[in-house]
Amino acid sequence: MRAVQITRFGGPEVLDIVDLPDPVPGPGQQLYEVRTAGVNFADTHQIENSYLSAQQLPLIPGAEFVGTPAGGGPRVVGLLDGGGYAQKVLAHDFLTWPVPDGVTDEQALAVVLQGATAWHLLRTSAHLAEGESVVVIAGAGGVGSLAVQLARRWGAGRVIATASSPEKRALAEELGAHATVDPALADDDPKNFTEALREANRGKPVDIVLEMTGGNVFTGALSALAPFGRLVTYGMAARQDTAVVPPGALMRRSRAVIGFWLAHCMARPEMMDAAMAELVPLVAAGDLKPVLGGRYPLSAVREAHQDLLARRTTGKLVLDPSR
C-alpha cells in the first residue's frame, strides 16, 4: 500500500511517500480500505515530536479516516492511534461509526475529531449555560468553525470568534459569531487582546474561552474572563508551553483553567458515542455545516501541512490516498 511515513522528526519536508506492506489486524481490529484521510493541526506537532505524547519512529501520521472494510462493507468514519495517511488502516470497532448516505467523507471527517472536540469543549469541559458569552479562538478553523455553530445552537448569549484575516473573520460571522477579533492584537501586549475581547462583549468580561494557541493569546484571554469564567485550553499552535498561572490569579476572580485532550475521550468510547450520536444527524439534516478546506492528493501531503502551518486554510483538510 502507499502511505506517508516519517523516519526523522521535522517539518513538512520529513513527510515521504513510500510503499509498505498492508497492516495485519490484531485482536479486536479490522482492516479498512481508506477512501479519505483527515488532516489535523495536531499532525504538524506529531511529525515534529512536539505534541503531548512522545512519538516513535518510523511512523505514519494521521488520526482519522473514512473507509470500508477490506473485502466490502458499509462506509464508516473512524479514529486511530496513528497510521491514517495511508491506503489501508487498522481500526477498532468501538472507534468507528456508520456514515449516512447524505453525509460526505469530508463532512464525516470534520465531525469525528474536530467536531467531537468542539462538542466536549462546550459540554464536558466548559459546561456552557444558556446566555453565557463564548470566545472561540481560531473561529474559522476546523474545531472553531464548529464550536461557533454549536455555541449558538446551545444558547450562548454572545459568541466572539478570533481569526487572522478579514476573510476568516467574515466566515466566522457567517457561521454565527456576533463579533470577531484579530488575534494579532496579542502580539505586542496581551492586554490589548484582553481589551478587544471585552469590547467585543459589549464592555463586559467573558464567561468561556476555547483556546488553542498559547502564548500571549492564552494570557490575554485568561485576563478577559469574568468571575466564574472558564478557559479551556486544547492546543499549542504558537509552539509556546510556558504560561504560568498563579493560584492567586484564579482565586481573585474565581476563574478556572481547564485542559482538554480528545485522547481521553477515545479511551472512554461512550464519550465519543455521545458526541457522534448528536453531531452526525445534525450534519445529515443540514443543521451543522462543516467548513471544508481542501482535498489534497496523498502525494501533496507536504503542501497540505505547509498550508496549515501558514494559516492559509479554513475548516477541514483531507487527503485522497488514491492520488
Image: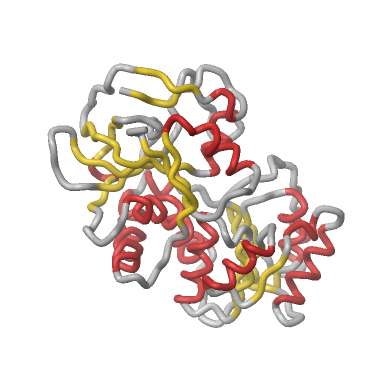
Left or right of residue 178: residue 1? left
Q: Is residue 68 above or below residue 142?
A: above
Quadrant for residue 8, please give it: top right
Q: Residue at 65% across / 69% down in the picture?
A: 229
Residue at the image position 29 percent from the left and 17 percent from the top: 21
Query: Residue at 50% of width from left, 44% of height from top?
Result: 40
Q: Nearer the viewer, residue 252 or 116?
A: 116
**Farthest front residue in view:** 323
Q: Position of residue 149 (x, y in %)?
A: 48, 70
Q: Position of residue 259 (x, y in %)?
A: 58, 52
Q: Quadrant of the C terminus?
A: top left
Residue at the farthest right position: 188
From the viewer's side, name the closer residue of 35 and 93: 35
* x and y, in percent, of residue 49 in the image: 58, 28
Rendered-image quadrant of the N terminus: top left
Vertical placement of residue 23 versus 115, above or below: above
- Measuring from the top left, give residue 196's x and y in whole percent: 78, 70
* Location of residue 27 (image quadrant): top left
Q: Where 5 falls versus 203 (above or below)?
A: above
